[in-house]
Image (cartoon, rainbow, N blue to C red):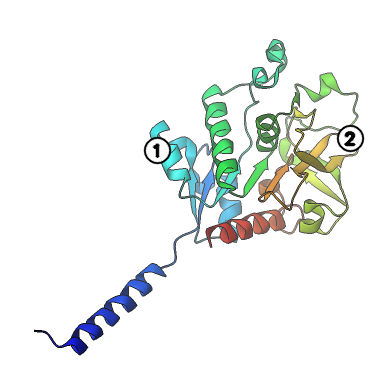
Amino acid sequence: MRNPVFILIVLLVLSILFAACSRVEKPLKIAVSYVSGKPETNNYLEWLGRIAPEAELLAMNELSNDSVELVFKQCHGLLLTGGDDVYPGRYGKEEDTARCGEFNLVRDTLEFRLIELAMEREVPVLGICRGQQILNVALGGTLYVDIPSDLNSTIVHQQEDWKNCYHSVLVFPKSLLSNISGVDKEVVNSNHHQAVERLADKLRVLAVSEDGVIESIGWADTINNPFLLGVQWHPERMDTLSVLSTPIAERFIKEAIKFKD
């Protein structure tokens, strides 16, 4: 018969080893809905990578349909990136396809599913440009199909030289965006011909441009919902010193880390 003391020592050592293994830090994983071009030159990946160089930034559009849900279950945040127009049939304006730009129906399907999964898991979500628009549509809102056609505005929201297309946004006081940025007005990079029209019931406006176009959205009820922020501009293209660029990435990463832990 083995010595009982020896057995206890072995069990104690095994329990210590098991506890140590269970405390191994899991990497932060961020799902990026759509990445085009080379990853090393992608603005979104570079923008988040500056804040969290240790994070795994996973391009969901590079996965097979069977893998998306499995991989997303391991992620701690969702970034919805900019790009093609959301198909207008998704928000009851299929007759207006001629006034839209290019569509990507496969991408639409992917991102609507990712939003659904994010809501189920209460994962932090950040939507940029198209990302804000598809968030609003997924939650029941609609879009202006074409700002120049639908609105009488003197503000240029999109031009061919998008690198030099800027306008001011007015940040609503005591909002999530106000808390993040600390400002009530700032200049942003703009590159969109569509925008939120009817806001989804569960959302609220956080910022507008001076012509009234909705520039940022979030939950109306921030207490009982996880982190969600949509911005119509492109923080990933802006100066890193801008309060409407880097602080947004920092807050999103902070929320993802909180979710992971």
Q: Residue at x 55, y 22 (%)?
A: 105
Percent from the top left, x then y, of residue 104?
56, 24
Question: Which residue is denoted by mark 2 in the rendering?
Answer: 212
Which image quadrant for residue 2? bottom left
Say few, some or many: other residues with alpha carbon within 10 Å of mark 2 (under 14 / 14 to 19 / 20 or more): few
Which image quadrant for residue 193? top right
Give SS at disc 2: loop
Cβ atoms under marks 1 and 2 closer than 8 Å: no
Give SS at disc 1: helix
The kind of residue on which mark 2 rests is Gly
Residue 205 disc label: none
Q: Measure how far apart labels 1 and 2 are at the Cα level.
A: 41 Å
Percent from the top left, x then y, of residue 35?
53, 39
Horizontal arrangement in the rendering, residue 134 relative to residue 179 (left or right)? left
Which residue is at the front of the view, 70 or 64?
A: 70
Question: Which residue is denoted by mark 1 in the rendering?
Answer: 67
Q: Residue at x 89, y 35 (%)?
A: 212
Percent from the top left, x then y, of residue 107?
54, 29
Percent from the top left, x then y, of residue 188?
79, 45
Q: Residue at x 69, y 19 (%)?
A: 100
The kind of residue on which mark 1 rests is Ser
Mark 1 or mark 2, which is nearer to you? Answer: 1
Counting residues from the start of the chain, the first of labels 1 and 2 encountered is 1
Horizontal arrangement in the rendering, residue 21 relative to residue 111 (left or right)? left
Say few, some or many: other residues with alpha carbon within 10 Å of mark 1 (under 14 / 14 to 19 / 20 or more): few
Q: Is residue 53 above or below residue 20?
A: above
